[in-house]
Structures are given as structure tokens and as C-alpha cells.
Image (spheres, rainbow, N blue to C red):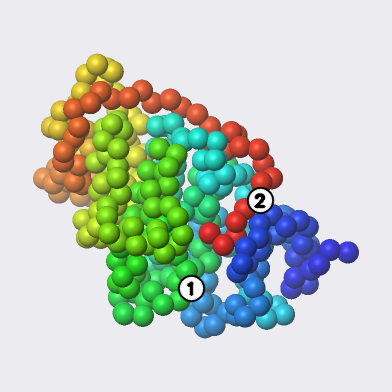
């Protein structure tokens, strides 16, 4: 007989392990469905603050976020019951090489939309990494909200948060406020890694943290425009200068409808700025038609764009569609600590 948690979740197979938690594929014998269970090591009990945050997390309903079904404590071990996603992590996918431009655009759009939804519900993920992004049927989904928290500005906001230093924003590393801009920063580094196949701040946690505090990420300027400008904005040292997750999502979602210039023609700064305004407006109108009608007069007077200033004069690269998840064999182990 398999081990059972809470009298209803039968543990079937271990699919990930780490120092602080292990992840199991399990069967919910009440609702007759397969789920994933993250079971923390002994001593990780659920306090009132964690219970409140999990209550807020359970209200999230977005296709880009792996759903939380249940949570509790048994035998002094806290556990989370979440939707089972049968696909590789982005970390596993990147072990086979970088993504194409179109794959990176889809990845960025999906995760930015998921983050925007969480931010609207006053939750900050705080650990957006390739390990916490799952790929399923050509789409990306964000998981492991176990350390999510409401935005905080007090000096102790960082004390109990176990982020991954290689993707952590400078303000977090220095004990600054917890805010949605930190998630945008992390996503920027994830996209940089997805495009180049190289982790920008690698090494031990201490080495990665020190490197990030000392320098900005080295973003290749030979990436097709507007990727260098986008990634520079997302990873700006000053969190105030970063675009919101909603802005990033709207831009990457709408960018697919652009008529790409010929390979031997470079877009001008004015052309890109105009494209960004038109694309952001088109995306907003498509998603919120009633609001768009109400404030149309206002929108016509304001430019719906975010800083993409120094546009490189290199040719626009061809976008090659592709499927992310299908390129990795299923069933590889997941590091539950990341």
C-alpha cells in the first residue's frame, strides 16, 4: 500500500528531491485525479502568516499558474497539493540548448501574464527561475509559489525568504523592499538565459549574489532588436525603472502581429517606438474592450509605451516557431530546492 497523506493523497512516485522538500506524484483518492505534492522537511510548519498567504494563493486562477489545491501539516511536515503538470522544467529544456526567438517570446509572454495576475492579487512570487517554470504543450507555466509573499517595505522583509541568488534583484540582496519589480527582474534574467543558453550569474549562491550586486547583466547587443532594450529595462538596477509585468506581457503578446522588416533592413528608433505604442494599445483593446471604449479619448492623448530608447541598427532576425516542451524527454528529476 502506498503512503497516504491526509487520508486521501496516495504517494505514487517521487519526481523531485532536495534539501528542504521532496515532490511526489500522488493520487487524490477523493476526487480521483493525479496531483503533485511538495512535502517540506520536518520543522517546516505552517504558521498563521503562511496560512494567510496560501489562502490568497488559492484564489489565483490563471492558465499560466499551476493551481494550488490544498495545503496542510502532517507529522510535523508542511505540504502543498498542486496541479500535476506533465512536462519538463525550463531548466531541463535549456540543457539541450537555447530557445528560438519565438519560443522565448511565448515563454516571456506566458510568465509575464502569470506574474501580472499574481501582482494584481497582491502576491510576489520571489523565485522566478528556470526550475520553477514548467513547459506543457508549447506553453509555459509558473509553479512553486510556496514562498510567495505580499509586497513588503519593512527592513525584515527578506529575512525568511529563500530566493535563488542568481536571479535575485539587487534590492532583495541588499535587504530592500519586496515588490513586483523583483519578479520582472528575475524574468528578465530567465529570458536572457533562454536566449543565450548561458546563466548570467552562475556559481555558488554567494558568488552569484556578489556578482549581481557588483555589476549589471551583460546583455549581448547582437541579439535582434528589441531584445537588448527589453532585457535591459527588465533588469534595471533601479526597480522603479523596470516595466511592470503587465506591460511586458502586453508587449510580447502583441509583438507577434508586427510585420517584421526585411532581413537587410534595420528598424529606426522612431519606427520601434511607434510599433510599441500601437502594439500595446492593440493588446489592451483586445483584452479589455469595454474599458477601452470608456477611456478611448484619454488613450489617444497618451503614448502607451515603456522605455526602449537606444535601438540597435542591426538587422531583424527571423523568428522561427517551435515547440518547447516536446524537445525534452519526460520523466527527468526536478530539483525541488530551486
Pick the front one: 90 or 124: 90
Pick the front one: 73 or 223: 223
**Residue 53, numbered circle:** 1
**Residue 41, position as x, y percentages in the image:** 64, 73
Q: Can you tell which quarter of the image residue 69 is in?
A: bottom right
**Residue 163, position as x, y percentages in the image:** 45, 65
Residue 119 in view of the camera: no
Q: Name the residue under label 2.
A: 333
Residue at the outermost bottom position = 48
Q: Residue at x 56, y 47 (%)?
A: 89
**Residue 298, position as x, y percentages in the image:** 15, 49
Q: Residue at x 66, y 51 (%)?
A: 333
Q: Residue at x 69, y 45 (%)?
A: 331
Element type where label 2 sits in the image: loop
Quarter in which the N terminus is drawn: bottom right
- Measure the alpha-carbon separation of dots 1 and 2: 28 Å
Amino acid at each position: 500500500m502506498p503512503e497516504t497523506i491526509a487520508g486521501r493523497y496516495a504517494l505514487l512516485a517521487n519526481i523531485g528531491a532536495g534539501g528542504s522538500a521532496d515532490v511526489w506524484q500522488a493520487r487524490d483518492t477523493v476526487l480521483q485525479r493525479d496531483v503533485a505534492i511538495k512535502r517540506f522537511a520536518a520543522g517546516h510548519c505552517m504558521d498563521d502568516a503562511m496560512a494567510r498567504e496560501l489562502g490568497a494563493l488559492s484564489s489565483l486562477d490563471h492558465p499560466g499558474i499551476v493551481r494550488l489545491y490544498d495545503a496542510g501539516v502532517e507529522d510535523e511536515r508542511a505540504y502543498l497539493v498542486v496541479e500535476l503538470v506533465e512536462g519538463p522544467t525550463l531548466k531541463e529544456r535549456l540543457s539541450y540548448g537555447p530557445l528560438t526567438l519565438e519560443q522565448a517570446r511565448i515563454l516571456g509572454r506566458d510568465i509575464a501574464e502569470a506574474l501580472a495576475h499574481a501582482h494584481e492579487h497582491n502576491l510576489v512570487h520571489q523565485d522566478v527561475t528556470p526550475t520553477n517554470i514548467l513547459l506543457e504543450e508549447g506553453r509555459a507555466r509558473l509553479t512553486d509559489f510556496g514562498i510567495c509573499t505580499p509586497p513588503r517595505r519593512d527592513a525584515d522583509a527578506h529575512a525568511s525568504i529563500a530566493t535563488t541568488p542568481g536571479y535575485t534583484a539587487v534590492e532583495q540582496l541588499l535587504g530592500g523592499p519586496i515588490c513586483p519589480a523583483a519578479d520582472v527582474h528575475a524574468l528578465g534574467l530567465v529570458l536572457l538565459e533562454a536566449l543565450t543558453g548561458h546563466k548570467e550569474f552562475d556559481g555558488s549562491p554567494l558568488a552569484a549574489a556578489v556578482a549581481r550586486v557588483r555589476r549589471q547583466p551583460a546583455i549581448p547587443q547582437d541579439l535582434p532588436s528589441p531584445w537588448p532594450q527589453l532585457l535591459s529595462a527588465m533588469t534595471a538596477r533601479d526597480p522603479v525603472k523596470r516595466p511592470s509585468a503587465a506591460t511586458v506581457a502586453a508587449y510580447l503578446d502583441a509583438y507577434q502581429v508586427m510585420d517584421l522588416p526585411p532581413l537587410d533592413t534595420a528598424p529606426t528608433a522612431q519606427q520601434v517606438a511607434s510599433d510599441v505604442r500601437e502594439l500595446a494599445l492593440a493588446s489592451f483593446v483586445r483584452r479589455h474592450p469595454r474599458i477601452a471604449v470608456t477611456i478611448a479619448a484619454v488613450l489617444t492623448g497618451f503614448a502607451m509605451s515603456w522605455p526602449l530608447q537606444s535601438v540597435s541598427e542591426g538587422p531583424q532576425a527571423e523568428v522561427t516557431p517551435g515547440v518547447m516542451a516536446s524537445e525534452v524527454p519526460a520523466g527527468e528529476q526536478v530539483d525541488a530546492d530551486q
